[in-house]
Image: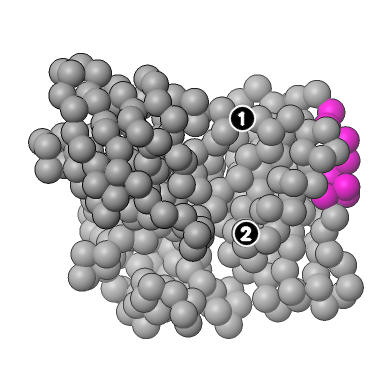
């Protein structure tokens, strides 16, 4: 992987789509077009103090003139959302990366089921725009406490029309995974939202016979496992035979960097996918929230994942 392009973009519009969610349109101050992207992609937003936050693009992938993101203010978050809400008014500038896509639409799918919870609507709205433009078959399930707390609701209704089903708690409607129907051949599910919703969708569909490789998800939050106790392990570099010791109190990413391997990174929490690397053998303890099950047999995230005893890295 190579380093991602960082651009200084201007805030063209900043609109409160709910009392807690700010919808931003970002444009280049000199160039008419931004790097191309596909539905499901995210960008890195770089804060003035060097911190990095990831936000999914929710605009139209066919519109190269702007990037659109929506940011929910998190009162007990890590500070990024508060900075964005307080600072990114029209005319302000922000440092934004070129897009990366860890959550793409399956190109061979015959039908797509999109399940959004709260701010998780952002990548799925971009998917709905792309699917509508291509004439693909899809349905959109939107979950929120109430219509007033559903980010980008007007845009979703406009794009999806009769394909949209809303599940508002204030109306006594909560999504049951059974509402998504049986696992018909060629149908794929894409879910993004709070972990409780994501777990319910994944568990419920698998219990109903859905193959795990046809249930896709994207997490905004790192894996929480307070009971996990890291252990030291060895990392062997397949190309050189070099063996590196990874202490219990250091990440594989940190050890690799200190050994001269220039791996890219961004969040270092296991949610952005920047530091993905390959491995050939070993028992890997996957602690990220981004790699699909189908890739975990040969890929890992060096920032948070570890190994039991030893791993051979394909670097």
- SS category of the residue bearing label 1: loop
Q: Nearer the viewer, residue 240 or 277?
A: 240
Residue 187: percent from the left, percent from the top? 76, 31
Residue topped by disc 1: 106
- Res. 91 image quadrant: bottom left
Horizontal and vertical percent position of residue 142: 74, 59
Residue topped by disc 2:
195
> At 49% from the left edge and 38% from the top edge, which residue is drawn?
291
Asked if the stretch drawn in magenta spans residue 79, the answer is no
- x, y percentage for residue 276? 36, 36
In the figure, 265 relative to 24: above or below? above
Lateral position of residue 244 relative to residue 20, left or right: left
Quarter-wise, where is residue 27 in the image?
Answer: bottom left
Say which residue appears at 74% left-offset and 42% top-offset. Answer: 113
Image height check: is 314 above or below 264?
A: above
Position of 59 with respect to 92 (left or right) is right
Q: Which percent across, then down, holds residue 259? A: 12, 37
Crowding at mark 1 (Cα within 10 Å: few <14, some 14-19, many 20+): some
Which quadrant would the N terminus be assigned to in this image? top left
Q: Residue at x 37, y 51 (%)?
A: 230
> Is there CB contact under 8 Å for labels 2 and 1?
no
| Residue 228 visible, this orientation | yes
Other residues around mark 2 within 10 Å, as few (<14) / some (14–19) / many (≥20):
some
Disc number lying in front (2 or 1): 2
Q: Residue at the spot x=47%, y=82% of the render?
A: 75
How many numbered marks are there? 2
Please tell me whether mark 2 sits on a helix, a strand or a loop.
Answer: helix
On residue 227, the disc is: none
Residue numbers of the magenta segment: 177-184
């Amino acid at each position: 992987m190579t380093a991602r392009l960082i651009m200084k973009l201007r805030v063209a519009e900043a609109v409160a789509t709910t009392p807690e969610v700010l919808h931003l349109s970002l444009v280049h101050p000199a160039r008419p077009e931004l790097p191309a992207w596909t539905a499901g992609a995210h960008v890195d937003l770089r804060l003035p103090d060097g911190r990095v936050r990831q936000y999914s693009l929710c605009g139209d992938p066919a519109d190269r003139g702007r990037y659109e993101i929506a940011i929910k203010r998190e009162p007990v978050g890590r500070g990024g959302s508060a900075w964005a809400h307080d600072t990114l008014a029209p005319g302000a500038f922000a440092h934004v990366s070129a897009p990366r896509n860890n959550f793409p639409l399956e190109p061979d799918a015959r039908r797509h089921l999109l399940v959004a919870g709260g701010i998780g609507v952002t990548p799925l709205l971009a998917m709905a725009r792309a699917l509508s433009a291509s004439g693909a078959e899809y349905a959109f399930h939107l979950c929120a406490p109430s219509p007033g707390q559903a980010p980008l609701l007007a845009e979703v209704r406009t794009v999806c029309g009769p394909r949209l089903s809303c599940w508002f708690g204030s109306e006594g409607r909560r999504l049951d995974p059974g509402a998504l129907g049986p696992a018909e051949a060629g149908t794929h599910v894409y879910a993004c939202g709070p972990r409780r919703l994501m777990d319910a969708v994944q568990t419920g569909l698998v219990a109903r016979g859905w193959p795990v490789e046809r249930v896709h998800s994207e997490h905004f939050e790192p894996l929480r496992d307070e009971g996990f106790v890291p252990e030291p392990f060895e990392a062997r570099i397949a190309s050189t035979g070099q063996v590196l010791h990874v202490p219990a109190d250091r990440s594989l990413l940190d050890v690799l960097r200190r050994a001269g391997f220039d791996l890219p990174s961004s969040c270092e929490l296991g949610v952005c996918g920047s530091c993905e690397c390959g491995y050939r053998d070993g028992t890997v303890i996957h602690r990220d929230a981004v790699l699909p099950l189908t890739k975990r047999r040969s890929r890992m995230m060096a920032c948070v994942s570890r190994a039991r005893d030893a791993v051979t890295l394909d670097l």
